[in-house]
Every structure is written in structure tokens, then in C-alpha cells.
Amino acid sequence: SAPAPPTGSYVKELNGSTWTLEFSPDNTVRLFRDKAVAVLSSVTIEGDKITFQDTGGPLKTAGNGTYTFSTTAEGATFVVVEEPSDGREKILSGDAWAKQ
């Protein structure tokens, strides 16, 4: 069965910054870098796949990024499936995001 979708906030330390992913019930996501909004996205979830489409923010990138995800009580991980943006992939994939 598919994992539960990510909800609420997750945090990760990367490149000397604290990144926060904040999932809202209306399928929008805000990505913060050191508490400043970096990217606004809309997400589509199908089974264990999540697709990010950036809609605003200073680090907004073109194109859609698709990942498989897994969630636990402790956090969430994202594994790239198809991603035109190296920057978005570096932030989302790799180490797990810690549930807040």
C-alpha cells in the first residue's frame, strides 16, 4: 500500500542552512531557508509518487520534479524519479527530513 502523504513540517540541515518543508492540506508546499520563504510549490501525490511544481519564491525553478517518498513518525525521505532541476534535487533528496 502507498505510504501516508507528508503532512506538517519537516527540517533538514544542508550546506550550512536550515531548510524547512511545510506541507499544507490544500496540496501547497512552502520551502524555507533559514526561516525565509525560498520556494512555493503545488504538489500532486499519486501512490508513492509526489510531483512538485514551483509557483513562486526566489529559488523557484522551471519544470516539474517527481520523486518517490516514504514517511514515518520520525520523518520523510524523497528519492528522485525525474527532475530537471539540480538545485531542487539536492535539497529534497539525500538525507531524511526530520518531522517537526
Image (cartoon, grey):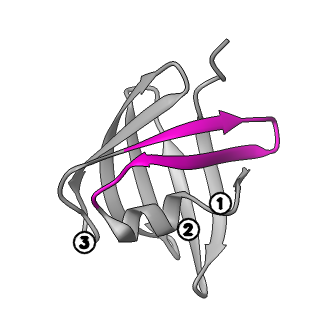
Of residues 3 and 34, the one drawn nearer to the viewer in this rendering: 3
Q: Residue at x 63, y 17 (%)?
A: 2
Q: Residue furthest top?
A: 1
Residue at x 63%, y 62% (from the top left corner): 94
- The residue beneath circle 1 is 11
Residue annotated with mark 2: 19
**Residue at the spot of label 3:** 58
Where in the figure is residue 19, as x and y percent of width and height?
55, 68
Tell me the amino acid under the disc marked 1: Val
Q: Earlier in the sequence, mark 2 or mark 3?
A: 2
Q: Position of residue 28 (x, y in %)?
A: 36, 38
Q: Is there a contact, CB below 8 Å, between mark 2 and mark 1? A: yes
What secondary structure prevails in the magenta region?
strand
The kind of residue tagged 3 is Pro
Locate the N terminus and report the quarter of the image it occupies.
Answer: top right
To which quarter of the image does residue 12 belong?
Answer: bottom right
